[in-house]
Amino acid sequence: MISGATIVYLSAVDWSAPWHGPQEIARRLGAAGNRVIYVETLAWRRLKAHDARRAAGRLARGLRRRGGGTGPGPGRTPAPGVELVSPLVVPGASSRAARILSRELVKARIRLSPADRPLVLWIYTPSRLTLDLVGAFGEDLVLYHCTQSHRHRPTAPPGTEAVERELIGRAGAVVVDGIELLRERGPLHPHVYRIPSGVDPAPYAGARPPAWAAALRRPVAGYLGSVDHRIDPALIAAVARAHPEWSVPVVGPVTDLDVSELRELPNVLMRDQVPIDAVPGVLAAFDLGLMPYADIPMTRYTYPAKLHQYLAAGLPVAGVPLPDLAELGDLVATGTGREGFVAAAERAMGDGRVDERRAVAAANTWADRLAALSVVLEGHLEGRPPRAGDDGEPLA
């Protein structure tokens, strides 16, 4: 496992957001003895109404100074080895002047010394600002970590595809998580690796449901995760209507979707975001895990982070057909449209292959993922870029 490096980590999510790969990877890199400067999202687009609360929190964090002092630099340490930076930037900056201002605001909050070697610039989101930051720190390696098809995001700024191609060209290594991302990005760079999301299976063994779940009528077909533009609430509603005898909890923050249809259904229970430590307990209350992704271009590129969480909990899974789910054969039931999704949920409910599902999760741990990322980082920093197998896995 790589240790002793300094990583300027331009994350795709704020630290307090629902827990996903960026926070987990940063936490594990910090725990391994690296200095991780976790830079929260850099406002690649103009703000929308639903961003107001998050933007207010960012403004408050951005105005704080470390330890109450007055100088610039990293902020609080949310995990060992991880320093949080919440820079104030111009949202969606496109003019040269605004981009220069945003770049300098970011640089002013990151304090580096000559001892911070090797130095890695880790980028999640292709934006004009992140491009401007390439080379700004004298980094030894630029790693572009692509976890979605950015040009297909509903809020993608104009020119996103061209910006991403330029970032790929300037990166030393590219890491993707999904099959379709590997297929598309593979020809664009000599060093593209596929490293999907993982899970820590240990907390799921013997996890106990939360107190609120005692009121749920069984069986329980639940969804855990963000309720945003990637999700089709009509699919969840279809399951709830088709099976009024089932309980259908939806656990996660609602951002940019109208979920009034779900709130009106008597067997649907809406719950807010839970911390990552509470996830195993929530899933212990489920009999079936739902993955109701919307039929939009970007979801074809999705590697569901919740997949291995569901499997670690031993849950049968019902989803929509995604390329990355095909690897699991019939271990994940899939169907298209409302009727197809309901049929998938019906096929999956009661599937007794608990041990088989947990075995898949045990073969896809975060420890394995970090080991693969270390192979990429160490190889490139030492001037020996690893080869990628046919499946994109880095070969030591």
Image (tube, rainbow, N blue to C red):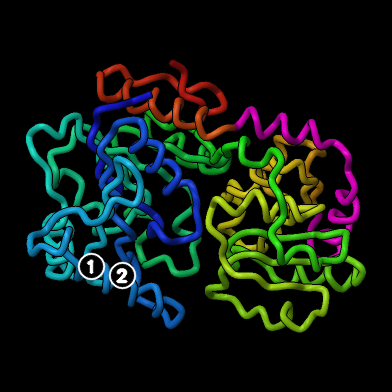
Give the percent coordinates (x, y) of residue 314: 76, 41
Direction front: furthest residue: 211
The numbered disc on residue 151 is none
Name the image quarter holding residue 296. bottom right
- Which residue position is annotated with label 1? 62
- At horizontal 59% and vertical 46% (from top left) the residue drawn is 303
Residue type, numbered disc 1 = Gly
- Which residue position is annotated with label 2? 58
Q: Is residue 340 magenta?
A: yes
Give the percent coordinates (x, y) of residue 102: 17, 64
Name the image quarter holding residue 192. top left
Above or below, 89 against 66 in this view is below
- At horizontal 25% and vertical 44% (from top left) the residue drawn is 8
- At horizontal 78% and vertical 36% (from top left) the residue drawn is 329
Residue type, numbered disc 2 = Arg
Q: Is residue 48 magenta?
A: no
